[in-house]
Amino acid sequence: MKYKEFKKWCNERAADSMWDILTAMKCIEVMRVVDKFWFWKRDKIWREYYEAFMLATFVKPTNNLIEQYKKSNANETTV
């Protein structure tokens, strides 16, 4: 996941409210730090220091919860 994709993911979660407050706070914190660098250095900083941790701790678990929620809603509407 590139840094721009991460920012897009965060913005989508802010729009659809499908995250918890800890994830929101961590995303904002990471974006504040990374955005302080020149735009051509952001992907490198993101990859070296934040990508693995953020994907494993916040992005993938949140995406899994969203998928479970969508599946449960799909099952409820068909019953």
Image (cartoon, helix red, strand yellow):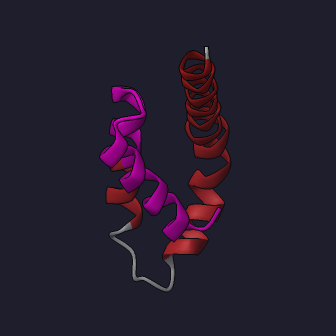
Horizontal side of 68 relative to 3 (left or right) equals right
Residues shaded magenta: 1-27
Using the image as rendered, state which of residue 30 and residue 55 is in the foreground. 55
Horizontal side of 73 relative to 20 (left or right) equals right
Using the image as rendered, state which of residue 47 and residue 59 is in the foreground. 59
Q: Is residue 43 magenta?
A: no
Q: Position of residue 57 (x, y in %)?
A: 61, 33
- Image quarter of residue 59: top right
Q: Is residue 5 magenta?
A: yes
Position of 47 relative to 68 (above/below): below
Q: Position of residue 64 (x, y in %)?
A: 65, 31
- Image quarter of residue 49: bottom right
Seen at 42% across and 34% down, the residue is: 18
Q: Position of residue 27 (x, y in %)?
A: 40, 46
Seen at 40% across and 39% down, the residue is: 26
- Image quarter of residue 31: bottom left
Q: Check the image and name the residue furthest to the bottom.
A: 40
Seen at 45% across and 62% down, the residue is: 8
Q: Which quarter of the rendered picture does the N terminus lie within?
A: bottom right
Position of 56 relative to 41 (above/below): above
Position of 55 relative to 76 (above/below): below
